[in-house]
Amino acid sequence: MRQIALYGKGGIGKSTTSANLSVAFAEMGLDVMQIGCDPKHDSTRMLMNGRWIPTVLEQMYERKDIAMNDVVFTGFGGTRCVEAGGPEPGIGCAGRGIIATFQLLEKMKALYGDIVIYDVLGDVVCGGFAMPMRDGYAREVYLVTSGELMSLYAANNICKAIARLSQRGTARCRLGGVICNSKNMDNERELVEEFANRIGSNFVQFIPRDKAVQVAEVNRMTVIEYAPISLQAEIYRGLAKTILANEDLRIPKALELDELENLAREYL
Amino acid sequence: MSWRILPESIYESRMAGCALGGALSVACFIPGAVAVVHAPEGCVHQAFSMLHAMINDSDVWIVPEILVSSFGDREVIFGGEDCLSAALDRAAVESPDLIIVVTSCIPETIGDDCGAVCARHLYADRILYVPASGFLGGSAKDGENAVLTALATRSPVAKSVFGTVALIGEKNLEFEADLNYAEVERLLAKLGLRVTVRFCRNGNYATLMQLGSSQCFVLRDERVAAAGKVFGERFGRPVIPEFPRGLSGCFLFLCDVGKACNVPEEKITAAMESETAYQNAMLAKFAGLSGRSVFLGAEPFSGTCAVAREAITRLSMEERSDGFPIRLPFYLPIGTAGVEKMLSLWRGATNHG
């Protein structure tokens, strides 16, 4: 079972990338599970054709005995979809919620299949959001970033978390590479490629900004479902193949803030 | 011998639990009040076990009124404000005089707004919120000070009543707490003063609220100095820093309290003369110890050796490294009575080994 986590700044397109990856893997005949690890619980919405599925934490809050079909839902292409969810904004501890979700999924033996994709809240604000990288869950982390400084900053922070966690005996996570989800900036690809190089990792894929993504989402579908023969769908399929073939997993070296800012300045 | 290498700060280490335990050691000694602990059950069990063991040790036969909000994993994730509110509802059923809400570290860590929950409760006027905050709040000492201070802020500033004294921060878990109180009361009586408030030991809420009318505050010891500072500033009354230490401490105490309470000079002098005679009579009972050589063991509480050495001198005893090894009392001897008790133990030890 391959366990893959996508991390990156909020709003950078992790959920869109994750959902399209899930469908691309499913098209290859693989058994895929996607787990949204973000309190805003919209990771799997396009796989569920716009349906907001009940989150694990909602179910935990409402009932004591939870069955697998209370939290695992079948989406497009047979993908299995889970949303961790979280507390209301401004109360409780969302990080603990992520940990509790993993404990429940483990207890229910729900974590199985050929590929599990964890779509995780961008900034690793606490240990809870590092959970997918710990205890033998996600072994491969892919950073999703654009060329914007704050997006690179978030990606760089996640590198720190990976480097720290890789020191532990129980954590076997490594960085699989960097995905550039374009914001149509000048020199964006070159900048993100150089960022990947500087942190000691690989540039995996450039995903151009395409209206097809927005159109598919307002129609509550992934790009691959809505426009299966589009160029953008092919790009997601290509990304899936690259990831599947990728065996080059590394421990990244995060950049100092000055270094990161200088890098961004170089490619303006 | 193992007792010779005991750490010097046994007392502090024994009392260095988290702030929750310290807060409960005060909150549980207010008859008619209920302590609501916003914490997981295990956390309260831990604090209560220590409390229970030490209460039993002190021969105090009370069962503290403690309600726990039973904070669990669900509350950690979704916030525990609702379960605190439910615990307050349960506490309010018995219509207690006071509901003291103390918190452990977890609700404070995840950011429960406990103050707001207390403020909007139907019984808000009877609720005293003390953010003890478990380890975040410091040690047991900080928990004690937090409850004392929070409670004092409820007590109105009143005109002082001549001849009244409030005792602050008696160590409720000390097995000699009431003996020490009796000794202080005896000394105060020589000055014509009386204890009107024991803040907080076995006094109900209405009694505690008379704090502001006391002419002066006597702290148990430096442990509650933080609360003492607040009391002094709030009520504008003199604060005596500690109970009398041993024999000479009695004279210092009589002098300081007498002046603080505007006792006439001649009455203070008379009280000191009376105490001198009282101490001489007490020491005469231990004349048999005169000339004995002793070796003092490890000092469990800072200052105990000084008190013991003074007694050694007064009884013409001798302290020598090859002297008879005697164990110092666990708590610092308070006043003449404390020294008398210590000497009784020494006599027993030297006579019977």
Image: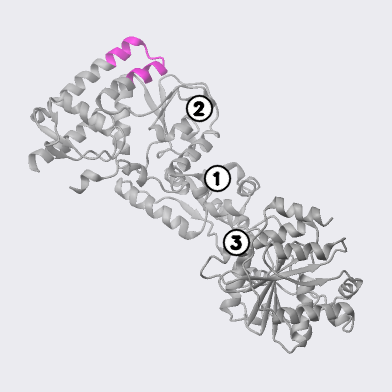
Task: Establish whether labels 1 and 3 are both on one chain.
Answer: no
Residue A135 lies, in percent from the top left, at 55, 71
Residue at x 51% of width, y 33% of height: B152
- Closer to the chain start, of discs 1 and 2, is 1
Magenta stretch mostly in which secondary structure? helix
Span highlighted in magenta in the image: B254-271
Residue at x 8% of width, y 28% of height: B291
The quarter holding residue A7 reads: bottom right
**Residue A150 to residue B298: above or below:** below
Nearer the camera: disc 1 or disc 3: 3
SS class of the residue under badge 1?
loop
**Residue A188 to residue A241: above or below:** above
Q: Residues within 10 Å of mark 2 (few under 14, many from 20)?
A: many
Residue bearing the label numbered 2: B212
In magenta segment, residue A142: no
Nearer the camera: disc 1 or disc 2: 1
Scheme by which the image is coloured = one colour
Residue A205 lies, in percent from the top left, at 78, 73
Q: How many marks?
A: 3
